[in-house]
Amino acid sequence: MENPSMINGSDGFQFQKLKEVMKKPSMEVPTPPMINGSDAFHPQKPNNISSEKCNIIVNHNFSNGLHSWHANCCDAFLSVKDASPKSCKNHVVVTNRTQNWQGLEQDISHKVSPGLTYTVCARVGVSGSKLQGGAKVIATLKLEYKHSGTKYINVARTTVSKGNWEHLEGTFMLSDKPDRVVFYLEGPNPGVNILVESVLVFTHDKISSCLYTDDGNIIDNPDFEDGVNNWTGRGCKIAIHDSMGDGKILPKSGKYFASTSERIQSWNGIQQDISGKLQRKLAYEVTAFVRIFGNNVTSSTVRATLWVQTRDSREHYIGIANVQATDSDWVQLQGKFLLNGQQSKVVVYLEGPPPSTDILVDGFMLKHAEKTPPSPPPVIENPDYGVNIITNSNLSDGTNGWFPLGNCGLSVVTGSPHMLPPAARDTLGPHEPLSGRCIHTTNRTQTWMGPAQIITDKVKLFVTYQISAWVKLGPGGSGPQNINVALGVDSQWVNGGQVEINDSSQWHEICGSFRIEKQPGRVMVYVQGPAAGVSFKLAGLQIFAVNRQARFRHLGNLTDKLRKQDVILKFPTPDSSGVHPTMLIVKQTQNSFPIGSCISRTNIDNEDFVAFFVKNFNWAVFGNELKWYWTESQKGNLNYQDADDLLKLCDDNNISARGHCIFWDVDYTVQDWVKNLNKTDLAAAVQNRLTSLLNRYKGKFKHYDVNNEMLHGSFYPNRLGQDIRADMFKTANQLDPSATLFVNDYHVEDGCDTRSTPERYMSLITDLQRQGAPVGGIGIQGHIDSPVGPIVCSALDKMGTLGLPIWFTELDVSSVNEHIRADDLEVMFREAYAHPAVEGIMIWGFWELFMSRDNSHLVNAEGDINEAGNRLLELKKEWLTHSHGHVNDQGEFKFRGFPGTYEVIVVADSKKTVKKFVVEKGDVPLVVPINP
C-alpha cells in the first residue's frame, strides 16, 4: 500500500511515488547538449581515477601509451586530444581492420577468478570513411582451454554513431578457470575504426574506488564552476549565479550556485543524466544544499528524484530524499537509493515546489553510500520493570508533583475506580488497589491544557514504557471528545494513547506506549484533548517499563498449546521373525502457518532479494502493483504487466498471494481522473474496475482487501452513497467466489488512534455484514511503534469475538537500534502466533530502501541480514518441530508438532529410509501411516 508520507502509520513505499505515477505524463528525458564536441556523460573525471585499487586492466586510460595492449591482426595508435570525435583525453584508434573480430585486446588470465562477478565499463567511439550510420562495438572474452578448445563470451555491446562517444557496460562471471582469458573490443564492419578512451574491469565489492572521483562524487560539475555544463533544465530553464536577491543570496560554499526559472509544473527542475554511472544492487547517497526563491512562497518541499528507464523500456521514478526548503537559508537535502536491475537510462533531478517558484541548488553530491555499522545492543541498567515513574500517582499528597499546563485549575476529588485499567492489569498482574482519588482539570481555555509532570530523569533510553490511566469528562461534558496522554520530548510531540468519550457518565481506559531513543533535554507528560471549556478527570496514571521476556515465556506456553498437533506415526506390526526396534528422526522442513512479505516489481530484478524472499516466506502481497492508481493511472490505459510479473514469481515458487487492494477509500489515493467523474460515470468505473481485475485474476489471489482503510476515508460512500461499500464486497464475491474478502485498516491494535479502535472496526464490519457483504477476514495492518503485548492482545481478543480470521497484513516496526527493532518484531510475531484468531502474518517488506518507514528493514541495502532479520529467522526456526526416538510395541511413534511439511528418517537393521508427510491442524490426534 503506497503512502509516501506515511500519515498516521498508513502503508507505503517511499520509492514508488504516488503523485508521479498518477500525474506525470510519459516523457522523453532531454539529452544534455554536446559539450566541446563530446557528449555530456563522462564515466569518470580523467585525472582522478584510483584504478590501481581494483581495476584489473593495466594502463586502462592509455596514459602509458599502448603498454599491455595489443592490436589483434590490425593496427593501433595513440591519438591526441584534438582528434575527432573530441575526447576529454588521449584515446586509442584501432585501424586497418579487415575482419569484424579484429580489435584491441589485453590478457587478463591471472587477474580473474571463478565465481566472482566482474563489471566492464568502457568508453568507445567509431570513425572512418566506410562508416555509415551507427556501428556496434562489442566487449568479448576469449576463454582458451588446453584440452577443450576455445570459448567466446560477449560481455557487452553498444551502438555508436560517428562523432559521439558511448558507454559500454556489462558483467560476467566465470564458472571455471580457463588456461587463458583475453579481453578484447571488436564488432564494427571491416574498414571502420574503433576508438577507445578508457577500459575498466572490476569486481563489485570494490566498485566505489573504480568509478568515482577522489571525493567519491559521480556528479559532473557538482559545484557549477564550469557553468551549466552537464546540467539541463527538466521542463524549465537553468542558470548559474554568484549571488541573487540584490546580493542577499550567496553560495553555500564555493563561488557559484544554480537556479531554475520558468517552472510551470511541480516536477520541473534541474537534472543531470547519470546513465551508465550507477551499479545495480549498490546503495547510493545524495546530498545537496537547496533553497527556494520567488512567487511569494516562503517554504516548500524540495525533492531529489531518479527517473529510470530499464532495458525493456519500462519507466519508473525513485524518490531519493525530500526536505522542507525556505527562501531564507540553505538546507541540506539528503537520502539514499538503490537500483535493483540493469538500466538503460538514469536521470537525477530536483523537483517539488509549486510552479513559478525557483529551486536553488549548491554542492550536489552522489556517491556510494557507506555501510552503516551494526547497532550494538543498548546497555540498559536497572530498568525497574513494572515500577510507576509518575510522582504522587495516587494523589495522597494533593497535587504535589503535578502542575497545570497552561492557565487551568487542578484539584483532587474522589469517586474514581479502585482497580487498575485492564491493559495495565494484564501486564502487571495482581496489584494494589488505586486510591479512588483523581485530578479534576477545570477552567481550560485551550485543548492542550491539563495536568502535567516532568519525567526527564526517570525515563531510560531504549526502554519501552506502557501508559495506563482512567479518564472521564467533567460534569456537563458531552462528546465526542478526545482525551490524550501526550509526551513533550524536547520540541517533539509523542502520542501516548487516546480515547474518544461521548458523555460524562462513565470512566474510560486510556492506554498506549512510547520509547525514547535519543537523549532528551526535557520530557514532559501531560493529559490534554477536550475542547476548550470542557473539564475532565484523570485517575491512576501509570507509566512503567515493560518486561518483554517475561511475556515471551507466557506466550511460548500458549503457542505450544494452540499451534501444535498430536501426531502418531503408525508403522506396520513386526512379524514373528522379529524386527529390531526402529530408530526415528523426525524433522520439520516447513511450517505451514502463513508468514509473508510485501514485494514490488523492481525488487524482483534483484536476485539476492528474490533468493531471501522465496527461502523465507510462503505468502506475498504486492506493494502498489495491484492498486487501481497503478493499473489504470490514466483512464482506459490498463497496466497489469507488473502484477503479472510478480504473480509469476509467486506461482513459480508455490507462494500464495493476497490481492491488495481493489479500492482505497482515502481521498488522496484516488486518481484525478476518477475524482473528476460524475456520479453515474464513477459508478460505471467502479464496476469496470471490479470486472477487469477479478476476471483477469480469478482464482489467482486467495485474499482481496476490497476497500482499503474505510475507517480513515470515505471517498466512495461520499460520492456514491453508503451502500457502495457492501456492494463492492458482493460484486467481488460474485466475480471470484474462491477469494476471501477482507477489510483492512491501521492503528487498530495500539490504542493511539480514536478513528480505528477495535470497537469502531467491529462496528464497521457488522454494519457491512448486515447489508449482506460477505466479509471473510479482518486485516490489521500493524504499522506499530513500541508495541506492548497485552495492549495488542486486548485488541485481538475484542476483534476475535467476531469469529472471523485475523491477519496482520502490513506489519512493520521501527527503531534506530536493530536490537530494539528485533525485540519489537518478536513482540508482534509472538503475540500473533499465540492468539487463536490470528491466521497469518504479512510483513510490509524487509529490504532497506524499499520500506515504508525508516529504520524498519530486516536486510540492509546491499544484502546483509541485520539483527531484526536474524530474529525473524530464529523465530521461524523455533517454530519447526524436531523429534527422535524409537517405535513402541504397538508400532507407533508419538510427538506434538507444528502443522507443516515433515520428513522422517527411519533406521532399521542398518537400513536408512526417508519418508515425507504433512501435518494439518485438527482436533484429534493425526495418524500418519509410514511404510518403510
Image (cartoon, helix red, strand yellow):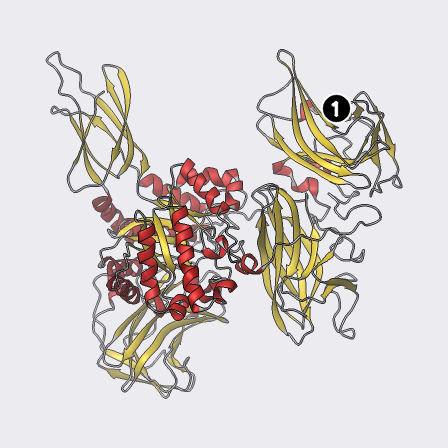
> How far from the left and from the top, in percent, is residue 2?
47, 57
Q: Secondary structure at mark 1?
A: loop
> How far from the left and from the top, in percent, is residue 676?
50, 67
In the picture, measured across the screen, residue 122 lies left or right of residue 394, that is right
| Quadrant the N terminus occupies | bottom left
**Figure quadrant of residue 461:** bottom left
Q: Total label count?
A: 1
In the picture, measured across the screen, residue 902 lies left or right of residue 380, that is left
164 is higher (above) or lower (below) than 106: below
485 is higher (above) or lower (below) than 596: below
Which amino acid type is marked by label 1? Trp
Q: Looking at the image, which is closer to me, 915 or 33?
A: 33
Crowding near the residue tagged with mark 1, few <14, some 14–19, many ≥20 C-alpha atoms within 10 Å: some
Q: In the image, what residue occupies the spot 25% across and 68% down?
A: 421
In the picture, measured across the screen, residue 727 lies left or right of residue 251, that is left
> How far from the left and from the top, in percent, is residue 453?
39, 75
Name the residue carrying label 1.
101
For this orientation, the residue located farthest to the left is 576
**Figure quadrant of residue 656:** top left
Q: In the image, what residue occupies the spot 61% across and 41% down?
A: 311
101 is higher (above) or lower (below) than 718: above
Q: Looking at the image, which is closer to me, 486 or 361?
A: 361
Q: Looking at the image, which is closer to me, 828 or 359?
A: 359
| Quadrant the C terminus occupies | top left
Asked if one can make out residue 827 in the rendered structure from this viewpoint, the answer is: no
For this orientation, the residue located farthest to the bottom is 443
> How far from the left and from the top, in percent, is residue 815?
45, 56
Asked if one can make out residue 28 in the rendered structure from this viewpoint, the answer is: yes
